[in-house]
Image: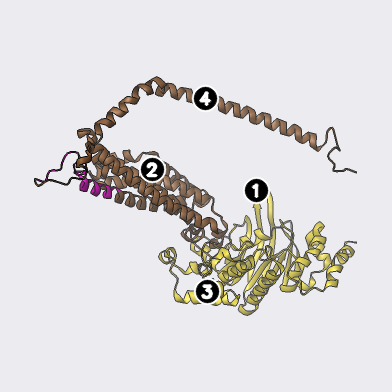
């Protein structure tokens, strides 16, 4: 169980994350939604400790995460994998090396500097790539791949870390609907098959509804909604998105659900939103 | 209703405000340019005065250059040009053999010079590689380490290699080792600066990626930064090698090995056709190496831009 207690992040005068308290049980798929600037990314980056909390605490199975240093911190990052909006792969290395870099925590100085990976690690990396349908690109230079392919490679890299938690920061925000669906399907499958906790920042409502067990809505750094994805009513969505609510609804047309949402629903969505506004 | 047409709108509208702002900017820029021009002219005049860079002095000195060159020109005679050594082992005056009597010695020394440049470049690059990562503002593990690295690199490149060579000759003795170390230290300073600037322009996304998998600082550099900057590093290293070949021909003047010692000796003690013999070989070697290395560098850059 991952527990966040009054977690706060301030950048100078602005408070990006404001006293977030959440309990996330193992194996749950959680979607964090909210408009840009709501503090979703800052929250995720604090959990992986890419950003340090200003206040509050993060605990995982009773272990305090917020104050870890040195090797213990790197061990936590290895346990708590991260997938980024811009993939953050090394474009000039081949796909296989990028995936195997997920094993770096288990390497000593010499083998990592020389780039020596064992046959077992290679096999593990290939199996991870194969799960995401990317094994055929293993020896290709990474920056020759498309965005959707890169994101799947990034998920493979996260998988070979053998993590307990997988964080995904807007994993589909720079992908087309087809690739967005592939990536979300993969995250969902990993959550179900491997029992990983997946925490995923999402921009669009319907993706959260479709894929997540539980939705956390953030606005101005605070949690304004928290519950099962089925409980995410239009009224709740309006609370999360504020003035941008209509936009968030219509964005459903450009997200993962092209082939799921019937045409009628797409036309009706703004009308429903307008009704909720009254 | 506001219409967008060419003639519409006069007075205090967006256009006149923009025009006023633009005129103000232009006036400011003009003033700055005039100031810079005045400064430039002042310093140019001052330096001409200090160096006494006057046309009559130049004209006066011009013939003396030719006088010196005339004294070191080989005396080649067409009839004897390709004469070998006689039965007594003496070369015939006027032949190339006579001019290049010490050819083997020169070639050995030039070989030594090139080897010195290669070793110095390898040592200097290795040092620059490590220090560039600690010196780059965005990559440095801690601000004070970055500061120290930058100061150290400044010292290394601030002192000319000939000075390092002079000191090192006292320390490790006369010979190529002093030269190699001197050139290596100076190249480390120069390359370290260039490398760290390349590193400062590298994308931090891959670095974040390696941080997120639990990588150490060294692993972030090795996997996140090095693949991005490698082509630039190689290109700069080859360019530095060209410079180092020239430098290793000079450090011999203070006893730090290579062809420089020979050049110094023929200039100071003989001042005859042997000066041109050595100079010609040095110029040929440097030109050849520059050409080859330039092609290699361009091939590398060309390959890059194709992607």
Chain B display color: brown
Label 3: which residue? A125
Q: Marks 2 and 4, Cα distance to the nearest angstrom?
A: 33 Å
Q: Which of marks 3 and 1 is in front?
A: 3
Query: Can you say whether B93 is above or below A5 in the image?
Result: above
Which stretch appears magenta? B88-113
Instruction: Say whether residue B139 is visible.
Output: yes
Mark on residue A12? 1
- The answer to which of marks 2 and 4 sits earlier in the sequence is 4
**Dot 2: what SS?**
helix
Q: Marks 2 and 1, Cα distance to the nearest angstrom?
A: 39 Å
Label 2: which residue? B156
Q: The yellow chain is which one?
A: A
Instruction: Name the spot of residue A211 as percent of width and height, x first.
Output: 72, 73
**Label 3 near label 4: C-beta < 8 Å?**
no
**Dot 1: what SS?**
loop
Instruction: Name the spot of residue A189 as percent of width and height, x first.
Output: 65, 77
Foreground residue among B35 and A211? B35
Taking the image as shown, residue B307 lies to the left or right of residue A223, namely left
Label 4: which residue? B41
Q: Residue at x 65, y 73 (%)?
A: A187
Foreground residue among A170 and A6? A170
Query: Can you say whether A180 is above or below B171 in the image?
Result: below
Q: Marks 4 and 3, Cα distance to the nearest angstrom?
A: 65 Å
Query: Can you say whether B307 is above or below B246 in the image?
Result: below
Foreground residue among A110 and B195? B195
Query: Which chain contains the residue that carries disc 2?
Result: B
Q: Which of marks 4 and 3 is in front?
A: 4
Query: Which chain contains the residue that carries disc 3?
Result: A
**Label 3 near label 2: C-beta < 8 Å?**
no
**Label 1 near label 3: C-beta < 8 Å?**
no
Disc 2 with disc 4 on a shared chain: yes
């Amino acid at each position: 169980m991952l527990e966040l207690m009054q977690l706060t992040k301030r950048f100078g005068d602005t408070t990006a994350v404001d006293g977030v308290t959440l309990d996330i049980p193992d194996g749950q798929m959680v979607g964090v939604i909210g408009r840009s600037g709501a503090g979703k990314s800052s929250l995720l980056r604090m959990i992986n400790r890419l950003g340090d909390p200003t206040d509050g605490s993060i605990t995982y199975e009773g272990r305090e995460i917020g104050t870890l240093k040195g090797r213990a911190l790197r061990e936590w990052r290895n346990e708590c994998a991260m997938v980024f909006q811009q993939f953050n792969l090394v474009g000039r290395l081949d796909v296989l090396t990028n995936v195997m870099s997920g094993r770096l925590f288990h390497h000593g100085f010499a083998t990592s500097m020389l780039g020596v990976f064992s046959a077992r690690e290679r096999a593990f990396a290939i199996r991870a790539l194969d799960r995401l349908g990317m094994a055929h690109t293993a020896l290709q230079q990474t920056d020759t791949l498309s965005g959707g392919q890169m994101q799947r490679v990034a998920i493979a890299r996260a998988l070979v870390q053998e993590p307990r938690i997988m964080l995904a920061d807007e994993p589909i925000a720079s992908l087309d609907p087809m690739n967005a669906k592939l990536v979300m399907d993969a995250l969902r499958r990993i959550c179900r098959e491997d029992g990983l906790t997946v925490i995923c920042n999402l921009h669009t409502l319907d993706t959260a509804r479709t894929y997540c067990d539980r939705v956390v809505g953030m606005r101005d750094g605070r949690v304004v909604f928290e519950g099962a994805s089925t409980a995410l009513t239009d009224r709740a969505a309006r609370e999360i998105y504020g003035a941008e609510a209509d936009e968030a609804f219509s964005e459903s047309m450009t997200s993962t659900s092209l082939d799921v949402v019937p045409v009628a629903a797409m036309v009706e969505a703004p009308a429903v939103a307008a009704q909720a506004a009254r | 209703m506001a219409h967008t047409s060419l003639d519409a709108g006069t007075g205090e509208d967006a256009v006149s405000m923009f025009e006023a702002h633009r005129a103000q900017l232009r006036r400011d820029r003009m003033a700055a340019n005039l100031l810079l021009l005045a400064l430039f002219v002042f310093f140019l005049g001052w330096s001409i005065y200090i160096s006494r860079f006057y046309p009559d002095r130049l004209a006066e000195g011009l013939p003396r250059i030719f006088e010196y060159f005339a004294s070191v020109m080989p005396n080649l005679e067409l009839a004897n040009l390709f004469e070998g050594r006689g039965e007594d082992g003496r070369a015939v005056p006027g032949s190339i053999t006579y001019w290049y009597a010490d050819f083997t010695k020169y070639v050995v020394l030039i070989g030594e010079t090139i080897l010195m440049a290669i070793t110095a470049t390898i040592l200097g690059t290795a040092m620059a590689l490590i220090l560039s990562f600690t010196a780059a503002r965005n990559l440095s593990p801690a601000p004070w380490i970055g500061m120290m690295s930058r100061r150290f690199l400044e010292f290394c490149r601030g002192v000319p290699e000939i000075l390092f060579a002079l000191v090192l000759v006292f320390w490790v003795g006369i010979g190529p080792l002093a030269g190699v170390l001197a050139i290596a230290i100076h190249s480390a300073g120069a390359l370290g600066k260039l490398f760290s600037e390349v590193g400062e322009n590298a994308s931090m996304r891959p670095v974040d990626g390696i941080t997120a998998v639990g990588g150490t600082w060294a692993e972030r550099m090795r996997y996140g930064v090095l693949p991005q900057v490698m082509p630039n590093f190689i290109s700069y290293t080859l360019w530095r090698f060209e410079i180092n070949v020239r430098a290793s021909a000079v450090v011999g003047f203070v006893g730090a090995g290579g062809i420089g010692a020979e050049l110094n000796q023929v200039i100071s003690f003989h001042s005859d056709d042997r000066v041109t013999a050595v100079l010609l070989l040095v110029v040929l070697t440097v030109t050849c190496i520059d050409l080859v290395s330039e092609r290699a560098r361009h091939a590398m850059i060309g390959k890059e831009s194709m992607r």
